[in-house]
Image (cartoon, helix red, strand yellow):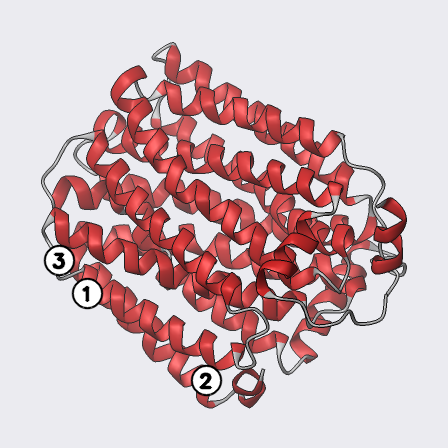
């Protein structure tokens, strides 16, 4: 199998058409991809469990009076850190062994998780701890994430890349179902500190999987020379590509304006649904995760769909419209149903954009392009600060209506100016 990997990575001729399930099985047949998949699975699980715990800790313990604003501020710390560190991670990913980059950054995430676990367990945690640890976590995660994405191509090559991306999305989105459910249950049974200890345990498991991976094959000619020059080359390459540029811009819009609703869920539960139960938050995030899982499965079933660009534009506009509807819903059942649909649409957006970028980027720039893509996730916490501020000044429902309508309008405008995306 190692020999087969080398042949594919080196640029094997196109394989005969496979069935949709055949593409997934072909990707899963790579031992190193399975290890990476398991590592991504538990990393994602730890992240989602921690997100539930952090939001609950802020809203119900550290800042009961100004929960929305404090959620926004801690998310802002994460976003600023990611904004600075993601480009650095992209250059590191293109310059060094990606397995080693993942190991080093995963260890950094483990240290942050253990620190948070100890502070919460000893009842020593304060808001300023949340700011610092959110900044530290964002800095390291923004270097870990792009490298994990780039490594998918290294272990399966071009031929099985689409199957690997969709399978990776299905598995990771399964954690969007189980992670929040586990987080809400842990808060109920073991207290909020349980979410942070589980996160630390997940990171240990993730490191153990990557340690077992063999040396991967990758195209030569990545980031070389001075660091700043390598970084600038990646930006110029992305800006000059007629397809990659609008894809990254669409990701920026959805990341900055569209993803805030997830991190504002603790405030939504408390101030709109008027519930103080951790299980309610867990149920809502589980519904969103279930929808995301469904969306990833549907995206994988589409196989080599010819009009991915048009699909991307359509689902992003629908995504914005559904966030507007969320601002009009104030019942638990209605919110649960809507979050299932939102999760499915959100997942379809992420999977479709990921496939379009992965299959159209030059391998020597892969890490740097994905670092720009991950900058969109850094904008999400900054968008949470904007959303939290609007919610603090006006109301949370107005926040959702404003953010959702902005997503739909801006992406519709981008679509009219980007024929390359419509043809993709």
Q: In which quarter of the image is the C terminus?
A: bottom right
Residue 317: % across, % down = 35, 75
Give the vertical position of 239 relative to 122 (above or below).
below
Q: Which residue is drawn at 78% across and 63% down?
A: 363
Q: CA gap, disc 2 to disc 3?
A: 29 Å
Residue 124: % across, % down = 37, 14
Residue nearest the observer in this picture, 360 or 53: 360
In the displayed structure, does residue 80 sit left or right of residue 91?
left
**Residue to which mark 1 is pinned:** 325
Give the vertical position of 376 relative to 240 (above or below).
above
Q: What element carries label 3?
A: loop
Q: CA gap, disc 1 to disc 2?
A: 23 Å
In the displayed structure, does residue 5 sit left or right of residue 311?
right
Residue nearest the observer in this picture, 394 or 146: 146
Q: What element carries label 2?
A: helix
Q: How many residues crowd around disc 2 within 10 Å: few (fewer than 14), some, or many (20 or more)? A: some
Residue 391: % across, % down = 20, 53
Q: How many residues crowd around disc 1 within 10 Å: few (fewer than 14), some, or many (20 or more)? A: some
Q: Residue at x 67, y 67 (%)?
A: 18
Residue 371: tell me if it is visible.
Answer: no
Q: Residue at x 34, y 12 (%)?
A: 123
**Residue to which mark 2 is pinned:** 415
Count of labels shown?
Answer: 3
Q: Is mark 1 on a helix, strand or loop?
A: helix
- Which mark is on residue 329? 3
Residue nearest the observer in this picture, 172 or 133: 172
Give the vertical position of 226 relative to 214 (above or below).
below
């Amino acid at each position: 199998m190692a020999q087969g990997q080398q042949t594919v990575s080196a640029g094997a001729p196109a394989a005969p058409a496979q069935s949709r399930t055949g593409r997934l099985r072909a990707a899963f047949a790579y031992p190193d991809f399975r290890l990476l998949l398991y590592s991504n699975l538990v990393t994602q699980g730890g992240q989602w469990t921690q997100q539930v715990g952090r939001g609950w800790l802020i809203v119900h313990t550290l800042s009961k009076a100004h929960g929305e604003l404090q959620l926004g501020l801690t998310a802002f710390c994460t976003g600023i850190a990611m904004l600075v560190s993601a480009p650095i991670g992209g250059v590191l990913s293109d310059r060094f062994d990606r397995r080693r980059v993942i190991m080093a950054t995963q260890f950094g995430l483990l240290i942050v998780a253990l620190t948070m676990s100890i502070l919460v367990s000893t009842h020593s945690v304060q808001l300023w701890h949340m700011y610092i640890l959110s900044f530290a976590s964002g800095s390291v995660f923004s270097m870990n994430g792009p490298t994990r994405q780039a490594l998918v191509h290294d272990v399966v090559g071009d031929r099985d890349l689409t199957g690997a991306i969709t399978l990776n999305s299905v598995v990771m989105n399964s954690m969007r179902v189980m992670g929040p459910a586990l987080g809400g249950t842990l808060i109920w049974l073991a207290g909020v500190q349980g979410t942070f200890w589980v996160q630390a345990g997940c990171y240990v498991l993730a490191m153990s999987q990557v340690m077992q991976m063999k040396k991967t094959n990758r195209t030569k000619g990545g980031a070389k020379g001075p660091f700043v020059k390598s970084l600038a080359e990646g930006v110029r390459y992305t800006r000059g590509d007629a397809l990659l540029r609008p894809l990254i811009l669409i990701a920026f819009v959805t990341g900055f304006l569209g993803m805030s609703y997830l991190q504002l869920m603790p405030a939504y539960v408390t101030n709109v649904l008027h519930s103080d139960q951790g299980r309610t938050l867990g149920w809502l995030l589980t519904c969103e995760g279930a929808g995301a899982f469904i969306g990833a499965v549907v995206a994988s079933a589409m196989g080599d769909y010819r009009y991915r660009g048009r699909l991307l534009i359509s689902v992003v506009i629908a995504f914005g419209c559904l966030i507007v509807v969320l601002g009009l819903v104030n019942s638990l059942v209605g919110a649960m149903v809507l979050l299932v649909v939102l999760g499915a649409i959100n997942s379809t957006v992420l999977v479709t954009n990921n496939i379009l970028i992965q299959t159209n980027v030059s391998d020597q720039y892969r890490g740097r392009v994905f670092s720009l893509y991950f900058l969109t996730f850094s904008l999400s916490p900054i968008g949470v600060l904007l959303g939290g501020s609007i919610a603090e000044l006006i109301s949370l429902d107005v926040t959702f209506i404003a953010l959702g309508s902005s997503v739909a309008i801006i992406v519709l405008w981008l679509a009219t100016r980007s024929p390359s995306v419509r043809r993709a």
